[in-house]
Amino acid sequence: MLNELKLENFRNFSGASLSFQSRSVIFRGANGQGKTSLLESIFFIANLRSFRTSQTREIKKIGSQSFRLGVSIKRNEKWNTRLELEAGNIRSLKIDGLPVSKASDFTGRIKTIAFLPDDPFIINGSSQLRRRFFDMFICMLDREYFTALQHYSSALKSRNFILKSRNLNRDILLSYNSLLAYSGEKIIKLRLRYSQLLSDGMKNILAEIRPELADFRIRMRYAKETEDRESFMKKLEADFSRDVQKGFTTFGPHLDDFDFIVDEKSLRFYGSRGQCRMASLCLKLAELEIVKMNSPSDNGTVVLVDDATGDLDVKAKFSFLSKIAMAGQIFHAFTELPDDGFFRESQIFQVENGTVS
């Protein structure tokens, strides 16, 4: 669990230092005071990205050149791990005071599952949001996927640059075809595997919380040619003229999508607001179960909850709070303190205008 969090020039916080003595922590305050920013800071140092923006420059306090974050992770009675980062024009990472050059060596120390108000958009929003969710979920569990995704993204960026170039070199383009096919095949196979795990987990949770949604599955929409490296390369070569005309790569895992199906109908098109909300909640609960199943001895699984229970009925709320209790530590953001017995042992912080007490 986390036993310390430090922030400097992060969002509306000039500086803050928090010590945690409980597995259950509540950040309480009015809207716009910084509760969600505290959750975001934990998510950021765990994943080196925000759940609110893709622009790191938006995170630093206005007028600042950079921001700093630090956490101390208590692994057992004798062993703590310290993570530190500074992000500005240049990013600096440290583990136990020692510089770290590779992001892959820094991330994964804290496994975070965030329950957020915008989660229903994973179900019914853009395909980019769904790919982002699945990529982050699988990267948390599988280093091979993390590496394949890095290599694929780098090769895709280079290939697209060449496709836009006036001096197009087909030989160089073919070399990137090979890189895309090699890493893309791995991405597809691992997405299929982990999406099936999530599908099974969601189906079980929905059967318990919302039986009327139990006829459920996740369907991955992808090009069959990407399952096989040779077929992948042949398809890229066949689409060469179209890609040149478009100026980008028109085929591959970067265009995959996922459908959440209930009674053979996609929630993206036919789901009500309530159904999409419940599906997104169960998606994150299934994610938590799988992360814990793959890391049974790891108490570094952290759940972040930003006012996620307000519109749940009593049964669903009880099931939700019971299920997230399996996490190593839970951080809640509330405008008002709940009266549930679940929070009797919680440590409470009052948040007001970028200060914590």
Image: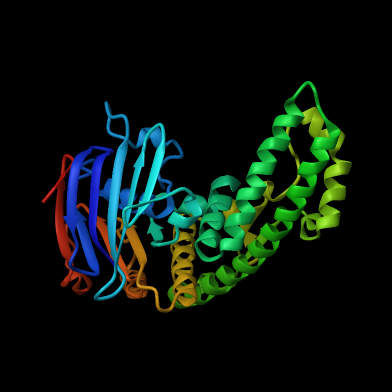
The residue lying at 73 percent from left, 37 percent from top is 159
Residue extending farthest left: 357
Residue 274, percent across and down? 44, 58
Total number of numbered discs in the rendering: 0
Residue extending farthest front: 98
- The image quarter containing residue 26 is bottom left
Residue 169, percent across and down? 82, 30
Residue extending farthest top: 166
Q: Nearer the viewer, residue 71 or 258?
A: 71
Q: Nearer the viewer, residue 223 or 17?
A: 17
Q: Nearer the viewer, residue 306 or 330?
A: 330
Relative to 314, 175 lies left or right:
right
The residue lying at 33 percent from left, 59 percent from top is 304
Quadrant of the frame with the N terminus: bottom left
Residue 119 higher or lower than 330, as above or below: above
- Applied colour scheme: rainbow
Residue 288, percent across and down? 44, 69
- The image quarter containing residue 312 is bottom left
Relative to 242, 153 lies left or right:
left
Relative to 268, 60 lies left or right:
left
Q: Is residue 50 visible?
A: yes
Residue 305, percent across and down? 32, 59
